Amino acid sequence: MSAQSPAQSPVRPAALELTGIDLHYGFVRALDQIDFQVGQGEVVALLGDNGAGKSSLLKVLSGAHRPTIGSIRVHGEEAAFHAPSDATAAGIEMVYQDLALVDAQDIATNLNIGREILRRGPLGWFGFVDHRAQRRRSEAELDQLGVRTAAMTRPVEMLSGGQRQVVALARSATRVSGERKGVLLLDEPTAALGYEQTQQVQALIRRMAKQGIAIVLVTHDLPLAVAVSDRIVVLNRGRKVADVATEQTDNDQLVGWITGARASMFV
Amino acid sequence: MPDDTGRQTVPAAGGAVTAPPAATAAPAPRQVEVDPRGIRALIFLRDRGIFVLWVLLLIGFAVWDHPFFASVDNGILIANAAALTAIFAAGVAVGIICGALDLSIPGTAAMAACSCGYLMEHGRPVWLSLLVGMAIGVVVGLLNGLISLRGFNPIIVTIGMLSITTAAASIISGGYSIPGLDSLEFMGTRRYGGVPAPVWIAAVLFLLGTIFLTRTRDGLRLMAVGGNPEAVRRSGIHSDRYKVLGFVISSVCAALGGLVSTAVVTEASPEASPAIIFTALTAVALAGVSLAGGRGSLPRVLVGALVLATISNGLTIKGVNPYWGTGVTGLLLLGSLGLEKWVSGTVSRRLVLTAQASVHSGRQ
């Protein structure tokens, strides 16, 4: 029952802000005048039926697609993503459903790949990795996120589904928690998980938000969205039909918006 | 469901599931987490089972073949017999670990050997000839890698390269062996400190290879690329470079193996024997290197080659026909597959249990 208000000051610009986004696939208008923003430390759940435009919006957010019209601002600065790597460079990390972990390697290696700590001195010149320092850093990072998974030297293939998801989330979290907190895009993070493991991931998402990371959560799991998010955005046929603080809505309303039975907030 | 139910479950669930909220605010000094003993024993069996097997074989043959087997001289004999297999096996293993089985190894070996022999026959210095032989390994590896990156199946690409390199070897040597390469004796039959040169070469190769794969950034990335190229790519690393590197290392090992074989018999043969790759593959598979890529360790591959040599040596001493050794090796290989499957299955079952336990209790 801790304070749920995001660490979002009114002065600070949103971590990621999309204005008037249109996305056309040929004649199909997948996204229609979408305004979307997520602030630092805020968890925004993105809901919608299949084909509502969730994935399209996620692809725009992650730089995989360029919007036909509309502007993207990262921390208040205009940005144009030509490729996912541009988004990554701007501090936006996508966590895919397939996790993309290296199964045979241990947790520490997985958390450190691409940003290895080299040993000091001549061994470092030859590219020798300082395993102990990497383990220490990973332990500290996981501690900060409040997740205890397993021994750092345990191969990822020997983890349960929930633990793997935690490692994947933590890996992305560590990549966006620099000076300026970044944005995490989560695509169905609990799709393959059981109840207990979903709880674990849910708690982790809250803790990451508490550290100031902006989180966009795309999910079909309505209870998860309600439990974990500060704000809920509902898409229906490429339009935003609801953008509401989670406290001010309930399941019935949300289901109404998702199915289209309830009229859009913005008409 | 009322509006606030979901909101209220969040912190409660968070507290119960993992660490208490206080721990998040100020992380307590963490004690090092250790896996349960049973699991550690199983992991040990999976990772070090080949060592255990080898020791058992050594003890068994030492008793059975007493007193001829357990002697320093026979040990050196086994090591020497294993050295060549081990060098080729290192190439096969690195290829597989990086995600591709390199079938061009026999051809690369023959081509490196014949080029080296041709140059020496034409009066070029030994060092230059050897260097050209190794360079051929690099070039073949680069070609294999760059062609495979275009989206072609690496197995077919390397089969094609096997034919090309075999033909090239014959063309260079004129279709006949190049005899009389006595100045290569220093890396063939000469002994240093009582140990033949091929054993030293294999030892250095495996030492360097192991350090590279487990201690350096590029080696770790190479293994990761074999395991999950997508994961590596998403970490902002050019995974393609590491794939090519895997092919190059594989072919360089092949060239080295070809040169050492040549040095042992002082004759460069253009014949590319496919038996090379199957023996090497047996050693690699015995070592538990998964064909799916991304896992495996060179010390185990070395022991795999030693196991093969030990079996054939031990049976030969006893006067058993060598084909029995081949059969026994096959049985061992199948047995090791079964063991690996059983261990992996047991570990994952036990770990799922403990993982669920930890979700409930908040600790391991």
Image (cartoon, rainbow, N blue to C red):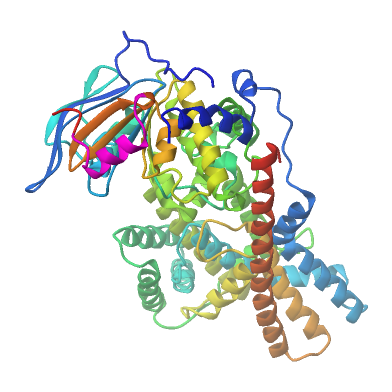
Extreme residue in the top direction:
A11
Residue B302: x and y in percent read 67, 63
Q: Is residue A254 magenta?
A: yes
Using the image as rendered, state which of residue A196 and residue A164 is in the foreground: A196
Can residue A93 be seen from the camera position used here? Answer: yes
In the displayed structure image, the side of residue B221 where residue B37 appears, left or right: right
- Magenta segment: A248-263
Using the image as rendered, state which of residue B207 and residue B20 is in the foreground: B20
Residue B14: x and y in percent read 57, 31
Q: Is residue A260 magenta?
A: yes
Residue B80: x and y in percent read 71, 69
Using the image as rendered, state which of residue B248 and residue B224 is in the foreground: B224
Extreme residue in the left direction:
A27
In the displayed structure image, the side of residue A215 where residue B223 appears, left or right: right
Image point (56%, 67%), residue name? B88
Q: Name the chief secondary structure element in magenta.
A: helix
